[in-house]
Image (spheres, helix red, strand yellow):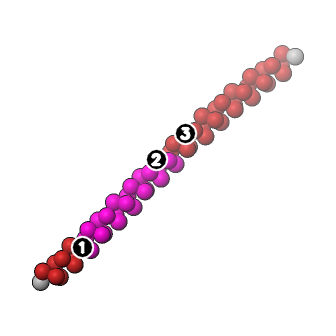
Amino acid sequence: MKIYDKEIYQREQIMQTTIIIVVAFVIGFVIGYIANKFEKQDHINALEQNVYILQKQLNTI
C-alpha cells in the first residue's frame, strides 16, 4: 500500500504544479492583454489630439 500511496501523492503533486503554472500563465496573459489595450488607447487619444490641433491650424489659415 505504501508504494501505491506514494504514486498517488507524486501524481497529485505533479498535477498541482501543472495547474499552478497554467493559472499563473493565464493571469499573466490577461494582465498583459489589458495593459496593451490601455497603451493602445493612450496612443489613439494622443493621435486624435494631434489631428484636432492640426485641423484647428488649417482652419485658421
Residue at (61% x, 40% y) in the render: 40
Q: Nearer the viewer, mark 3 or mark 1?
A: 1
Location of residue 60 (image quadrant)? top right
Number of marks: 3
What span is colored magenta in the figure?
11-33
Return the x and y of residue 33 as percentages of the image width and height: 52, 48
| Amino acid type at mark 3 | Phe
Task: Give the residue number, with chain letter if any, for mark 1.
Answer: 10
Neighbour tally class for label 3: few under 14, some 14-19, many 20 plus, Cα within 10 Å:
few
Residue at (56% x, 43% y) in the render: 37
* Left or right: residue 10 compared with residue 50: left
Tell me the CA gap for discs 3 and 1.
42 Å
Up the image or down, 47 lies above or below 6; here it is: above
The label number, if any, that marks residue 43 in the structure image: none
Up the image or down, 33 lies above or below 55; here it is: below
| Amino acid type at mark 2 | Ile
Residue at (66% x, 30% y) in the render: 46
Task: Quarter of the image for the C terminus: give it.
Answer: top right
Task: Give the residue number, with chain letter if any, for mark 3.
Answer: 38
Task: Quarter of the image for the N terminus: give it.
Answer: bottom left
